[in-house]
Each structure stands twice: as C-alpha cells, then as structure tokens.
Image: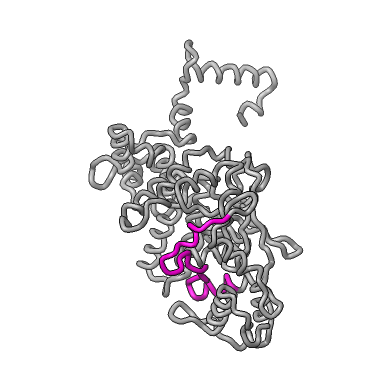
Amino acid sequence: MAEAAQKPKEQRAKFIEDRLAAAFDGDGKAADKVALQYAPEVTFTQDLKADTWYGGPTLSEVLQDNVVKVPYLRAVLPFIRSPTNVARFVWDRSPLALTRRQFWTDIQAGGERACLATGRLILGAAAWVSAVDLAYSDRITGGGPQDRHQRAQLEATGWKPYSVVVTHEDGTVEYVGYNRLDPFGMVLGLAADYAEVSSQLGKRETEEVAAAMVAAVAKNLSSQTYFQGLARTVEALAAPDKPMGPYMGDFIASHVPAAVNSFREDDELREVRSVMDALMAKIPGYTTQLDPRRNVLGEPLKVTKAWGPDWLSPFAHSEWRQDGVADELARLAMVNFRGFRPPPTKLGNVDLTDIRRGNGEREQSAYDRWMELTGTMRIGGKTVKEALEGLITSPTWETMTDGNENYDGSRTQVVTDILTRYRSGETDAYAGVA
C-alpha cells in the first residue's frame, strides 16, 4: 500500500481496484497465492507437517491423529494445531531453531526459504537478547518458584508471575501480566524463566546453559492455558498414590466459561478441597460458601484484578503492597528455597476441614476458624503480624542470620517459633518480641 500512496489519486484508485480484482476469482474465492500462503501462518492454523530427524511424522501430527481416533482425548487436548504453531513460532525464533530438522531443510533448499529461516533466527535472537536483558534487570517476571509455599510468600507481597514490572517515580510498583499475549508473551516468559533457572546454577558452563534453556521451555509451556490439561493429566498419572480429587476438580471446573467467573462480586480467593468446591469457586453467588484462602498469618487473600474491565481485559494486574512483614518473609523464603507453611489440616485423625459450623452466610470449617484466630488473637497486646513487625524492625533482627537451603538461620527459626505460639494460643509472647 506504500506504493499506492505515492501515486496520483486516479492511479491510486486504479491500483487498488486492480489489486482487489486480482485477489479474488469470479466466485469470490481468494486467488492471491502469497496471501493464501501467509494467511494460515498469521492465524497459526498452518498444517502440522514438518521434516523430522527420524523421517516420521511430528509429535503434534501423532497427537492430532490419536485425538481424531479417540475423541475422549479432546477432554485433555482440546486444541492441538494452533498451540503447536504458536510454540513453533517461538521455537523458530530462538537458538533452539538449530535443533529442528525443518530449519536445516529450509537452509539447504536455498533461495527464499533459506532467507526466511535465517531471518526468523536473527530477528528472534535480537528479541531474545532484549527479553533476557529485561529479565535480568527485574523488569519482567517469570513463573516463579515451584514450591507452592515459597510461591505463596512471594505473591503475598503483590508479586505476580509472567508480568511486566512497572516502577513509578513515587516508588510504587505495578505488575501487569503479559502471558496472554502469545506468541510474543511466550518469548518474554521463556527469557524470564531462563533467567530464573540459570541464576540458580553454578558456573555458566555449556551444559548448564542448555539445561536451563530446556527447563525454561518446559516450565513455560506447562503454564500455558492450552497445555495445562495435558500437564495436569501427566502429573496425575505420574503420582497415582495422590488423591484424584484436585485433578478432577480442576478438570470439571475448566469447562465453566471464564466469562462467568469474571462477574463474581466476591473479592477473596477461596479454598478448593473437592470437585464440588471447584465448581462453586467458579460460579458467582456460590463462592462465599467456601472458606477463604489465607496466608500463613491468617489473612484472607484477595482476587487478582485485571488491568481494565475484568470481563474484557486479558492483563492480570497487581501492586506491590509495601508490607514490610510480607517482604521479609518472602526474602527469607527465596534465600532458603522454601516458604513458611500453614498448620496441618489434621490434628491426629481428625480432619478440621470436615468439621463445620454455621456462621450466617456460610458454614465455616474448624480449620478456617483456627487460621482466622491465628491472625486476630493478641499475645502481649499484639497480633502475630504486629509481633513479627516489631521483631523485624528491632536491632536484634540485624544480629540474626538468614540461613540457606541446607539449614535454617536464626531468623527463620524465630519466625517459625512465633507462628507456632500464635497457632497454639500460648499467652506468653516470645522473649524480646512483645
């Protein structure tokens, strides 16, 4: 169209008319071969066939054929073509492109195919360098720690996975999710995951860099919504001794349209302990009948709001809470590679989540009541959060040690002791804290 803009008005009109006439045949079907070639690529619907090192069909072709033969697999793999092409788009624009047989076939073919393959790799490398720089400078986040307790500690500060970190002049920090912007969001996510994984390695030797890259790919793909069904199924099959309730709950709840959940008025996250709980947590009006999800201090956790209208915006949004206690607990969790744990749901053979008592709008479990009291009761005139805040801001805290992944430092030990005292309801505060 740039060519048309340089022509006089009459010639420009004739040029556009000729182009439109050439683009369609007499029946109104598309006739432009170049456009027909690129239309499937930009919509990620191109054929799954590709050259492989062993000469057989690609894994995605095998999966697609099996889903056609066994329709029940659609429940686990509802989409194959588009997710695979999105993943290939990113793969072909990263150093991993060198591992694909199709890349070398295109190079050997020469001409336009070789130019396109090389161009994708070079431009992709430039994007990767920029993305990795953003990750190492903490301007984007990756998937975060795998340990759920460590992750919970981090999220309590306002941190969010797969987000752009926006730091304002007044010191406030916002997290805006990018993981719904595939395929470009996947490039950022892979770079951020690579930065997280590689930072935990020793010397950056070749095999360690390769291991970090493979781990980043696996971590990022398993976080994508269109791969989560397969990831959860594999996880469930790999651990047959674990209860199937959480898996079945996630599976059934995934069939509830996301638009339904966007109209919920409840602003608290809810505990899901059964299949029915998973459904209730997705349906407005039923969520308040479930126990709220709480942090280790007994405080209820809030639902992440979208950046813009919840029913329309794909961008998750959160703000750094500037909570000194949460920040320090998260720092200790990252240093020690493990987070502080909530109390067990069972006392002996008694499951406290099964004991429920009416409380107006809902029946509260004994476990939730215990967690609630942990956060509100006072020992020496202070709540557990006030006690921890007093400790962390005291000169004593400066003389304590952090510890590491092999042993708990004195800071971790004293925090654990304070949490235990409040959970057990002891009336004598920890020495030096009250």
Indicate whether 427 appears above or below 172.
Answer: below
Q: Is residue 256 left or right of residue 247?
A: right
Residue depicted at 57% across the width and 66% down the height: 370
Residue 214 shown in magenta: no
Compare residues 364 and 157 and report the one nearer the observer.
Answer: 364
Residue 333 shown in magenta: yes
Residue furthest right as drawn: 170
Q: Which residues are magenta?
A: 329-357
Q: Where is residue 118 shown, x and y percent of the image?
A: 42, 47
Indicate whether 169 appears above or below 278.
Answer: below
Indicate whether 154 appears above or below 117.
Answer: below
- Tell me the quadrant of the picture where the N terminus can be found: top right
Query: Is residue 130 visible from the viewing direction of this image?
Result: no
Q: Where is residue 328 shown, x and y percent of the image?
A: 61, 74
Residue depicted at 62% across the width and 43% down the height: 264
Indicate whether 379 appears above or below 148.
Answer: below
Residue depicted at 38% across the width and 58% down the height: 214
Q: How is the image coloured?
A: one colour
Residue depicted at 66% across the width and 68% down the height: 376
Which corner quadrant of the image does residue 294 belong to?
A: bottom right
Q: Where is residue 357 shown, x and y percent of the image?
A: 57, 56
Q: Is residue 356 left or right of residue 85?
A: right
Compare residues 392 and 26 and report the one nearer the observer.
Answer: 392
Q: Where is residue 5 shown, x and y percent of the image?
A: 66, 28
Compare residues 322 and 107 and report the one nearer the observer.
Answer: 322
Which corner quadrant of the image does residue 416 belong to?
A: bottom right
- Tell me the quadrant of the picture where the C terminus can be found: bottom right
Query: Is residue 258 visible from the viewing direction of this image?
Result: yes
